[in-house]
Amino acid sequence: MTNRIVLIDVGHGGTDPGAVWKQDDGSIIKEADKAFAIADYCGVYLQSRFIESFFTRIKSPGKRITASDRIAEARKLKPACFVSIHCNAAESTEAHGWEILVPVKMPLKLATDIENEWRESNLDMKWRCIRQREKKDRGGMLLNGVHNLGIPCCLVEVGFLTNKHDRGLICDPDWQKKCGQAIAQGIIEFLKDGAK
């Protein structure tokens, strides 16, 4: 029987806000919150297509969730794929666009399916690239840990909180929904081709 379980890894959370941006009014935008909103839309869309989706964390967990915790969840569920959702950040406010990170030596099909669906969704954000990550690289420990379980995986950086244009999109609920649905549709395309 074809595995139609998807594990959505929601970046950061709990005592770890991820990237943060302080607004002129003093309010704080947290990567953990925006990643959860996008992941939630992704999960709802998958469920509407009769694909079981699970999350590595709830909206406001009381503790930090480590890469080891996330890998352990993947080991327990044995999903058809694992997709981690994050927002990017940089010292330069000029850095912008979205990208997908994958472990080294893993086929790129999951990442390219998500890329293709994102491009077709016209999300008004520059495409950067697909980057392969060694264990020591940003996101590498998580990705390579999941890959070592034999589970296709990738990490989607949906844009830069430190860039005004990207941040405006990331904070817009309508855009969050379109983004989550584009990621979900990419996952569906991946599953159509007989993911285990």
Image (tube, rainbow, N blue to C red):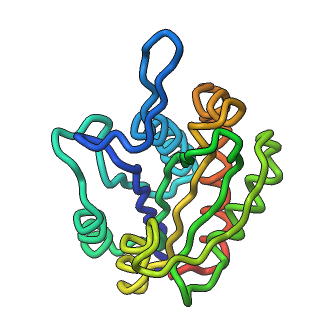
> Which quadrant would residue 66 be assigned to in this image?
bottom left
Which one is nearer the viewer's eye here, 62 or 137? 137
Q: Is residue 178 above or below residue 140?
A: above
Left or right for 89, reference 178: left
Residue 25: image location, x then y, percent:
49, 9
* Residue at the image point whose x is 46% and y is 73% from the top: 137
> Which quadrant would residue 166 be assigned to in this image?
top right
Left or right for 13, reference 153: left
Residue 147: image location, x then y, percent:
43, 81
Q: Is residue 42 above or below residue 172?
A: below
Residue 125: image location, x then y, percent:
76, 43
- Residue at the extreme front: 91
> Which quadrant would residue 145 be assigned to in this image?
bottom left
Residue 111: image location, x then y, percent:
64, 69
Which one is nearer the viewer's eye here, 15 or 57? 15
* Residue at the image point whose x is 61% and y is 48% from the top: 158
Figure disc tally: 0
* Residue at the image point whose x is 65% and y is 59% from the top: 99
- Residue at the extreme top: 25
